[in-house]
Image: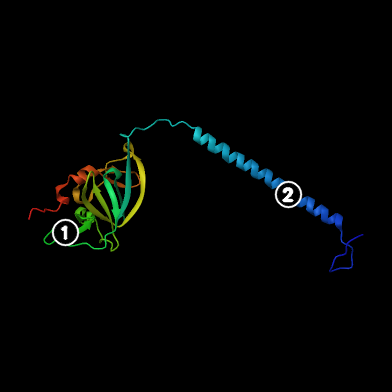
Amino acid sequence: MIAKNADSNDPFDWNAAKLRLQEAQQKLDRAEDLSSIDSARVLEARARQLARVPEKVLDSTEVIEVVGFRLGDEMYAVETEFVLELTRPSEITPIPQSEAHFIGLINLRGEVTAIVDLRAFLGIPGKQASNSQILVLGIDRIEFGIAVDAIEHVRILQRADLVEPAAVVGGHRELMIGCTHEGLMVFNGEAILSCEELYVDQSD
């Protein structure tokens, strides 16, 4: 018995329908074959990359891990080993009769911590952002915090790739390790923590 098309008086062409289904299946089979080939190529490329032996294994003295941050339109970084935490304080208490680069004091879990404006200290143009974040610096304990406009990602740098900065705003070359070819200025964390000008005199 031949089935009838509901919208026509002509008999339904089963042979044509089967042919269309066969063609569709063949297209699917070809697509699956291509996908398998592409997957095999990707896996092979990944295997080659993982099996590649580095030309030279760098030791810890040849690389530094830094966290990048922005001051105005300029990008800077400091070694992560001198960064204790990142915070955004709700209240900063001004310090009377202090240098212009001291923003104020915050209470960081019971520790009175001075906040430094590196932009003012180095003479970088622009004003401090209203929503500044604070990089808290120190080694075994909190020393002080620096206000930054934005935090960028952590990255690994090779010391050999750092060059002498063309110019250092404020003349504080001793605070810099160097500069990348992209213009990222890298602070020397140990030098920053040793800079007496960045500490508030609490003798009174």
Q: Residues within 10 Å of mark 2 (few under 14, many from 20)?
A: few
x, y percent for residue 26:
75, 48
* Marks 2 and 1, the one that precedes in the sequence: 2
Q: Which mark is residue 22?
A: none
Direction from residue 45 to residue 56 in the image, left or right: left
Local crowd at mark 1 within 10 Å, few (<14), some, or many (≥20)? Answer: few
- Which numbered circle lies on residue 27? 2
Residue under numbered circle 1: 100
Q: Which residue is painted at 75% across and 50% down in the image? A: 25
Residue 78: give x, y in percent of width and height: 28, 46
Q: Quadrant of residue 71?
A: bottom left
Specify the quadrant that holds the C terminus. bottom left
Residue ranking furthest to the right: 1
Q: Is residue 33 above or below residue 97?
A: above
Q: Pick whichever, 122 or 63, lies toward us.
A: 63
Chosen colour scheme: rainbow
Number of residue marks? 2
Q: Nearer the viewer, residue 203 or 38?
A: 203
Q: Give how far across and how far down residue 92 sits, in percent.
A: 21, 62
Q: In terms of image quadrants, where is residue 94?
A: bottom left
Above or below 195: residue 47: above
Kind of residue at badge 2: Lys
Quick check: 121 left or right of 50?
left
**Which residue is depicted at the point 32% across and 47% down?**
67
Question: Which residue lies most toward the front here?
Answer: 110
Q: Position of residue 120 (x, y in %)?
A: 20, 57
